[in-house]
Amino acid sequence: MRLTNLRSSSLFIWTLLLLLGTAVLPALKADLVWDAEQGWRIEGGILDSGDPETQRPQTALELMNQAREFQEDGKDRAALRRYRRVTRRYDQSIYAPEARFQRGLIFKERQQWRRAMTEFNTIAQEHPEFDKFDELIETQFAIAEKLQEGARTRLVSRVPGFRSKSAAIEYFEDVIRNGPFTEKAPLALMNIAEIELSRNNPEEAIDAFDRLINDYPRSALAPESYLGLAEAFSQMVSGPEYDQGSTRQAIAFYEDFLILFPDHENVERAETGLREMREVLAQSRLVIAEFYHFRRSNYTAARILYNDTITASPDSEAAQTARQRLDELPEDPS
């Protein structure tokens, strides 16, 4: 009986604490705000005393204001050092994510992209409640775009490094991981695909287009993804003498695009691509048909393959040749 009473009392206490916590939680919410006259200050929450001089933790606030003053004066190194002290000494405080964010912005201005991305990624992983999260994702996306466009990273403040499309892909992946439900995520996948196509890596581009279609089927970029898949598979086509798996995949995605988006502005481009792929497939069937016709004298197989050639692309040169061969084809003696 006593054990039952004890459990009931404990349950009551935990329930009461939960209700009180829910009621008090809005009052605990605090925001870190900057303005040029007062510097950094906390608004709202239990830390807001209305007097910056009595806010705690006082040392963190002083470091933040010193860092911002140096930052405003263009003294980046001094600002970075003080923001670093905040992140090390007060890593669980409201100041920590803001200090990291400001460090990231400084590194971005110095074109030290990797160091900037490291700061932003740490915020995303350790402080997902950060009130500037949308701005963080926008900034990461902007860095990745700069590298996609050929910007150089800087090893240190005055020493330029190399252009790196691989780093651009890495940073776009950071955007997708940190903000999978933001509008930048499908854009990042599209940019990854475009980079891979420009580097003649159609397999990797296909993966990015496929992820975009499956993860963001309602995105405005979905039509371009279907067309991108078709064109990526087209890049993998080696010619009529080789396996036609990629050709068939390209045809399938061109057809999907034309069925799903008949009014899209790129319909003509898709129709051209589809016609070219069908012609390749027709040429491939013709090559095999003539092998059976002239090398094996298997007229039954040749006849089937000549008809396949015509079906694949009725208006192609391969189809015209196939019709001529059918007229000339002797009956199979078997």
Image: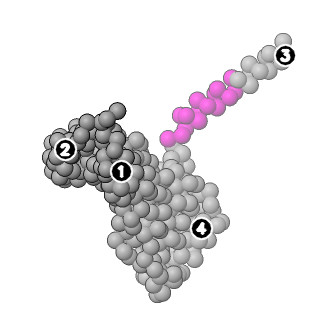
The residue beneath circle 3 is: 2
Question: Is 24 left or right of 298, judged from the image as shown?
Answer: right
Looking at the rendering, which quadrant does residue 72 occupy? bottom left
How crowded pointer 1 is (Cα within 10 Å; few <14, some 14-19, many 20+) is rated as: few
Q: Nearer the viewer, mark 3 or mark 1?
A: 1
In the rendered image, which quarter contains the C terminus?
top left
* Image vertical order of residue 186 relative to residue 218, above or below: below
Furthest residue to the front? 333
Q: Residue at x 64, y 32 (%)?
A: 17
The residue beneath circle 4 is: 86
How crowded pointer 2 is (Cα within 10 Å; few <14, some 14-19, many 20+) is rated as: few
Q: Residue at x 36, y 59 (%)?
A: 238
Q: CA distance from mark 1 to mark 2?
A: 16 Å
Give yes or no for contact between labels 2 and 3 (Cβ–Cβ under 8 Å): no
Q: Nearer the viewer, residue 203 or 279?
A: 279
Q: Nearer the viewer, residue 9 or 311?
A: 311
Q: Nearer the viewer, residue 164 or 33?
A: 164
Q: Amino acid at mark 3?
A: Arg
Q: Secondary structure at mark 3?
A: helix
Residue 143, given in percent of the width and then of the height, sits at 40, 67
Query: Magenta stretch mostly in which secondary structure?
Result: helix
Q: Which residues are magenta?
A: 12-26
The residue beneath circle 2 is: 328
Q: Amino acid at mark 4?
A: Val
* Image vertical order of residue 182 relative to residue 299, above or below: below
